Structures are given as structure tokens and as C-alpha cells.
Amino acid sequence: MNTEKQLSRGANSYLDEINIQYEKLTAFGLEIHKVQLSQIKEIFQLDHIYQELNIFLPPNIKSSRFIRQLEFLTGRLAAKYALQSLNLQDSIIYQGKHGEPLWPEDVMGGISHVGSKKSCHAIAYARNNTVKEKTFGIDIESQKHYVFFKKKDEFYDVFLNKNEQAEIEKLQKKQAYFYLVIFSAKESIIKAIYLKYKQIIDFKIIKFKQLDGEFIYFHLRQESLIEINLEVKVQFFYTNNEIITISCIEN
């Protein structure tokens, strides 16, 4: 789908100076909106685009580095497309105390982004919060980030136990970027758990169980604070340069 037809712009629009690519993906019956922004080189361009698209720019983001402002913009633009499916594209998404997006009333959603100074990618979804049978978390990672997973035990220990590392090492030979896929999958689960329970959990309580095609299964158990005992299914797929994961918690 071509975003050029969907973004309203006035004369001498700064949107004419940048490259915006948009596509819609589907997983678990959920529409996921993916945006790529490139050809933005200066902060003054970002300022004008934020204003033109009526996207809220929090003070902590405005004072941050260029790349952080670009990532935030790309994520909020993806969210704008997601809200368009609910006829809420003019709604302003504010920022919560933990940095989470504050969606319009009766809307549940998620945003994830990854980028560099040359381009930034983001995904988002938004759905009616009255549909409560499932909770979703989403994550996007650059395949270039796999360089961080070149067998550094101390890094793996942050998000995997030793049994998981042994299992994933076997699968790594057949499945490209699998350590990065697992990292992303656990990130998406953490986001889904926060949406459902308003609680931030640790990577280590999410245990890898098995790989089945494009789906990964995890078991999650926690007894402190809120007791959680769940089986979680995650779908993953590759784009040209990214890995996208979507976790689904059955309510």
C-alpha cells in the first residue's frame, strides 16, 4: 500500500522531502502496520514533520539524540496508520510514566521500532479493547543486530538459562538468526504481559519450549506479586532486513 495517497499534506509539505514506505501485515488475525522512514537528515525536518502530522513530541524525546527522535516519529506514524483502521487517526497518543504509549479510550495497542541514521522501521497495531479474548505484544529487530549474538555467554545469560542456550544452539544451525528471534520473541511477550497485568517481568521467567514452523512456544511462570502461569505462542517472520515477532496470550 502506498502511503503517499493516505497522508494529507499542504503546499510545500516537508513530507514531500522524505521517503515513506508502508505495508500491512497479518498475524493471529491481527493487522500490523509497518512503516519505514528514510531521507531525513536534519532535526529541523523532524520538528516540522511532527507538527505537520500532529504527533505529540514529549520533552524527554525532544531533548534526545536525532536517531531517538526519528525512531519515536516512525513508531507514532505506524500507530497513526493502526488507528486509521478504527477511524481514530486524528487521536493524539501521549506517553505514560514508563514511556508506554497512551492509547485513546477503549483502544489497546502496541508499537515497536528499530533504526539507524539512514532509515527507521516501526510496527504498530491498535484494536478495540472490548475484545478481550487475546492480548498481543509485538517487536521488530534489525537482522544486523545479530552481530551482538556471536557467542558471548555473558550476553546470552541476560535472557536465556543454560538449558535454553543448549537447545537453541542446536536449532541455530537450521534457523537463521535464531538467538535474535528468541530475544525478540521474549521482548514481545514482556510487552504483552505489561499490557495484560501492568507488570514488568524478567526475561528469565520466560522459558523456551519448542519451535514449530513459524511459531515458537514458551512457558511463563511467576509466583511473586501477581501469580502468572501461562503457555505463550509467538509467531515470527522475516522482512528484507528485519525480524518481526508477535506474541499472543489467550485470556
Image (spheres, rainbow, N blue to C red):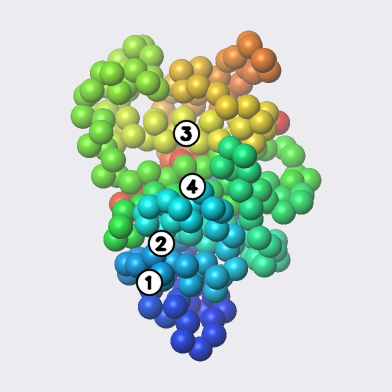
Cβ atoms at labels 3 and 4 below 8 Å apart? yes
Spatial distance from mark 3 to mark 4, Cα to Cα?
Answer: 10 Å
Spatial distance from mark 1 to mark 3, Cα to Cα?
Answer: 28 Å
Cβ atoms at labels 2 and 1 below 8 Å apart? yes
Q: Secondary structure at mark 1?
A: strand
Q: Circle 1: is it few (<14), some (14-19), or many (20+) Cα within 10 Å?
A: some
Q: Earlier in the sequence, mark 3 or mark 4?
A: 4
Which of the labelled discs sits on residue 19, or is there none? 1
Quadrant location of the C terminus? top right
Q: How far across and how far down the image is residue 172, in percent?
A: 27, 28
Toward the viewer: 94 or 90? 94
Q: Residue at x 76, y 51 (%)?
A: 105
Check the image and report above or below for 248 versus 6. Answer: above
Q: Is residue 92 visible?
A: yes
In the image, farthest residue toward the bottom: 11
Q: Amino acid at mark 3?
A: Glu
Check the image and report above or below for 127 versus 45. Answer: above
- Disc 2 target residue: 36
Q: Secondary structure at mark 3?
A: helix
